[in-house]
Image (tube, grey):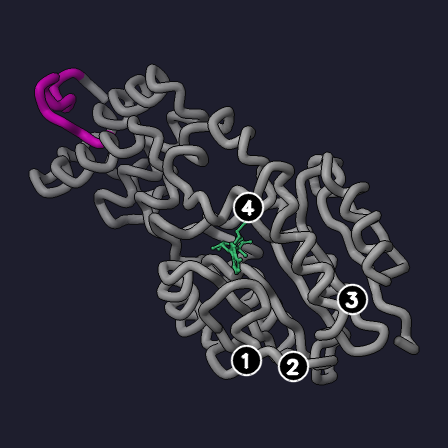
Amino acid sequence: MTDSTAPPDDVWTVQRILQWTTDFLKQKQVESPRLEAELLLAHARDCPRIRLYTDLLNPLTDDERTRMRGFVKRRANREPLAYITGHKEFFGREFAVGQGVLIPRPETETLVDVCLEHIPTGQPASVCEVGFGSGCIAITLAKQRPQLQMTATDISPRAMDIATANAKTHDVESQVKLLAGDGFEPLGGTTTEQFEGIVSNPPYIREDELAGLEPEVAEHEPREALVSGEDGLLLTRRLITEAVSLLKPGGWMILELDPAQCDTVADIFGAAGFFNTRIYKDLSGLNRIVRASLPKGS
Ligand SMILES: C[S@@+](CC[C@H](N)C(=O)[O-])C[C@H]1O[C@@H](n2cnc3c(N)ncnc32)[C@H](O)[C@@H]1O
């Protein structure tokens, strides 16, 4: 590029706005500021990220600049990127997300992998999830196992809206029944022995832990998706106890937890009558998932 083809310094080209945003987000202690600047600008211009590199010297339109200014302000306030772009990839698929619903995490892909090991291909099965959030677990399991019927509950009305939209986008509405309410309550009181498996990524953060988390989580993600009592296990204890009467003999329960909770939860499973307990590690090598089964003859 020669000087004669360079845009004047006061023109907001793609290149210039990327540099400015990267520096600004770095000052605000955002991790991966360059990557996030690119993702925000691609979102503001409604184009694929790669396109920014062919357009580096192009000026932004007024509309694009206004949108970008709004996005950068939100991100500098440590709102999660996925809330600004409105989507997050999970298990190779895009899920809509927004304020009021937990952003799917990579650890939860390990939870899905462990569930898939327990759901045979090519035969019908029925699995329940408590706390569907964006719907990423129930919908992914349904996509990966076309004969699976999922019944999933969540206490959050916002989660219901978003998961309903995601189930439609991924075309699994006939396989995924979404119910609003607390724990297993929406299933109805008299329901027994109906599921081969139960899965949950429940809220598991301790009440005193929340304030110390990254602002993206502590200040923007929904409290009911994160915190569960003084030791983080309030909902988990209840789900394990109640799961016993909902599972078929030999049925399994698979939970995502904090690494420090896995041994305690293995004991809670044992006390409730489960056996065959196993702890799985996530991709960072941390204990993350606990699986336990009911005896075949129970
Ligand atoms: C950690 S998030 C998991 C969301 C999603 N399954 C995922 O893995 O990304 C926990 C979810 O449980 C829901 N939840 C919290 N308490 C609940 C309860 N008592 N009954 C049903 N759902 C509950 C929250 O609204 C939230 O969507």
Q: Where is residue 207 in the image (x, y as percent from the top left)?
A: 54, 35
In space, the residues marked 3 and 2 are separated at their CA atoms by 17 Å
In space, the residues marked 2 and 4 are separated at their CA atoms by 31 Å
Q: Left or right: where does residue 139 sit relative to residue 199?
A: left
In space, the residues marked 3 and 4 are separated at their CA atoms by 23 Å
Residue 93, magenta (yes or no): no
Residue 13, magenta (yes or no): yes
Q: Which amino acid does label 2 sit on?
A: Thr
Relative to residue 174, is residue 35 depicted above or below? above
Q: Which of marks 1 and 4 is nearer the N terminus?
A: 4
Name the disc covering residue 175, or none: 1
- Residue at horizontal 29%, vertical 28%? 77
In space, the residues marked 1 and 2 are separated at their CA atoms by 19 Å
Q: Left or right: where does residue 153 sit relative to residue 70?
A: right
- Residue at horizontal 70%, vertical 41%? 283
Q: Which of marks 3 and 2 is nearer the N terminus?
A: 2
Q: Which of marks 3 and 4 is nearer the N terminus?
A: 4
Q: Which of marks 1 and 2 is nearer the N terminus?
A: 1
Mark 3 C-beta to ligand 1 under 8 Å: no
The answer to which quarter of the image holds residue 51 is top left
The answer to which quarter of the image holds residue 166 is bottom left
Q: Position of residue 2 (x, y in %)?
A: 19, 18
Q: Earlier in the sequence, mark 1 or mark 3?
A: 1
- Magenta region, residue range: 3-14
Q: Name the residue under label 4.
A: 105
Mark 4 C-beta to ligand 1 under 8 Å: yes
SS at mark 3?
Answer: strand
* Magenta stretch: dominant secondary structure: loop
SS at mark 2?
Answer: loop
Q: Name the residue under label 3.
A: 252
Q: Mark 2 points at which residue?
A: 191
